[in-house]
Amino acid sequence: MELEDYGIRILGTDEAGHLLMELPADRWKIEGNMLRILPAIVWTSEEEMLGISLKGSKIIYCVVKNFDDVVTLKSNYRGILFDIWSTMEPNDIYDNSKDFCKIIIGSNKDKGFSEIPNKHLSYQGQESTKIFWLILEMISVTKYAMEISIELADKSVVNFRK
């Protein structure tokens, strides 16, 4: 790996000949008396995500924020979606979700439906890839920010932010 792979930029040298580098704060940590340099995160684009199946995947890390306020830190797709929905008005949830999933007004416990707490709406569960795209739609509607790291079924990791 090259220094650029770690997000390090060479600035030059000082009068004593010491190498001066710029290292972003999220690319290093101190462990005991050792400085550990971490590789830069490679972000997957939304277009690249279209070709990725999330079936059998596991969320390693997720944060959804409304500016500095954390909306969720959950590590499962449904939990993330429900936390985002908890910040929205029922009409906004219904209007912006009905094209992505089966959502009905009222409480319905039949055929895989779950009630959305305190919203008088019910949602029919879906597999992880479809829930992920619904989450992205809700992120766009609410103008929230999201960073998520996902371990895929083949153990590779994708990082995505919106």
Image (cartoon, grey):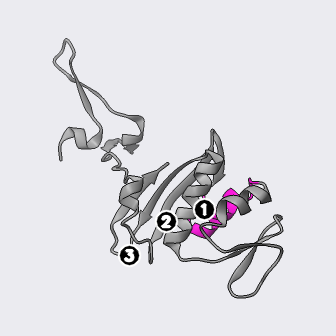
Tell me: residue 153, above or below residue 93. Answer: below
Q: In this view, does 97 lie to the left or right of 33?
A: right
Q: Is mark 3 on a helix, strand or loop?
A: loop
Mark 2 vs mark 3, CA separation in Å? 11 Å
Tell me: residue 111, above or below residue 47. Answer: below
Q: Which residue is drawn at 83% across and 74% down?
A: 106
Of the two numbered discs 3 and 1 on the same chain, state the one appearing first in sequence: 1
Q: Residue at x 63, y 39 (%)?
A: 68
Q: What element carries label 1?
A: loop
Type of amino acid at the residue the image marks with label 1: Lys
Q: In which quarter of the image is residue 75?
A: bottom right
| Dot label at residue 74 | 1
Measuring from the top left, give residue 137's x and y in whole percent.
58, 56
Q: Do the residues labelled 2 and 1 touch (CB within 8 Å)?
A: yes
Type of amino acid at the residue the image marks with label 3: Ala
Type of amino acid at the residue the image marks with label 2: Ile
**Part of the protein shown in magenta:** 73-88
Given residues 71 and 97, the one toward you in this image is 97
Given residues 126 and 95, the one toward you in this image is 95
